[in-house]
Amino acid sequence: MKNWYPALIGYRYTSVKRSNHFISFISVISMLGLIIGVALLITVLSVMNGFDRELRTRILGMVPHAVIKPYATMQDWQSVDELVTAHPKVVSAAPFIQIKGMLSASGLVQGAQLNGVLPEEEKTVSIIENHMVQGSLDDLQSGEFRIVLGDMLARQLRVQKGDRVTVVLPEASLTPAGVFPRLKRFTVSGIFRVGADLDGQLALIHLEDAAKVMRMQGYVNGIRLKMDNLFDAPYVSRQLASSLDEAYYSIDW
């Protein structure tokens, strides 16, 4: 009987006599307001849960949870890699060389960020291998000067796997004919699609090829970190940077 009390009270105040229509009107408006409020709350929670899932699985699947970088150069990156991966909250780490430049093909030019990576290491800190639509990260081999492009970037340049693109670096080379921007031809070996802005901005090349292009053999720009809990990234990355020495600093997502 107790389960019927709410229904009986609701029926009483929505079906009052003709002389009390105002009370009935107020009751109906109150219930509609409650229904709309609950519906909006459910909708907002669903949107936020969806955003949280996309943030974790897509955006932060490509963007590092944290980065350890040197103020000058990082030469002995292997020892830094061993130290940071020994931390219990660090799942994996990978070195990288970051290059800002332009890609040119078929008379088209697009700005891009090129990341020099080690394919096997990159797979442990990024979801990109799971989103390859052509080729594989393993096709990036040292000395072959191959490049993996985002799907949108490849469409903007109108290239497919096997085509050639020219990397234009914002540095000048002095030749007998004068001063020219530094250029290097790469072969497209793969295309990825993660469904984010990175599809139109990011390209990957092998770490050693990036070192040759940038003339920084044996050096890297930093170490990318993947945490078991991404919300621990600020604290853990600062702790790791301070445990190295004053030559390093951290950046978190």
Image (cartoon, helix red, strand yellow):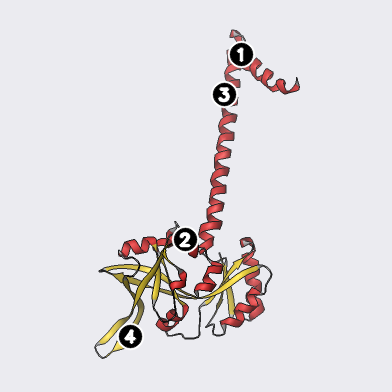
- In the rendered structure, which disc, 4 or 3, sits on the residue that comes first in sequence? 3
Q: CA distance from mark 2 to mark 4?
A: 37 Å
**Quadrant position of the C terminus in the picture:** bottom right
- In the rendered structure, which disc, 4 or 1, sits on the residue that comes first in sequence? 1
- In the rendered structure, which disc, 3 or 1, sits on the residue that comes first in sequence? 1
Q: CA distance from mark 3 to mark 1?
A: 14 Å
- In the rendered structure, which disc, 1 or 2, sits on the residue that comes first in sequence? 1
Q: Are marks 3 and 2 in contact (CB under 8 Å)?
A: no
Circle on res. 173: 4
Which of labels 1 and 2 is toward the front?
2
What is the three-letter code of the residue carrying label 1?
Answer: Ser
On the picture, is 163 further left or further right than 221? left
On the picture, is 106 further left or further right than 53? left
Residue drawn where x is 58% and y is 8% of the image: 18
Residue drawn where x is 63% and y is 78% of the image: 82
Report the residue marked by disc 1: 15
- In the rendered structure, which disc, 2 or 4, sits on the residue that comes first in sequence? 2
Q: CA distance from mark 4 to mark 3?
A: 75 Å
Circle on res. 192: none
Q: Secondary structure at mark 3?
A: helix
Which of labels 4 and 3 is toward the front?
4
- In the rendered structure, which disc, 3 or 2, sits on the residue that comes first in sequence? 3
Circle on res. 131: 2
Residue 157 position, x and y percent, is 31, 65
Using the image, determine if residue 59 lies above or below residue 103.
Answer: above
Report the residue marked by disc 3: 29
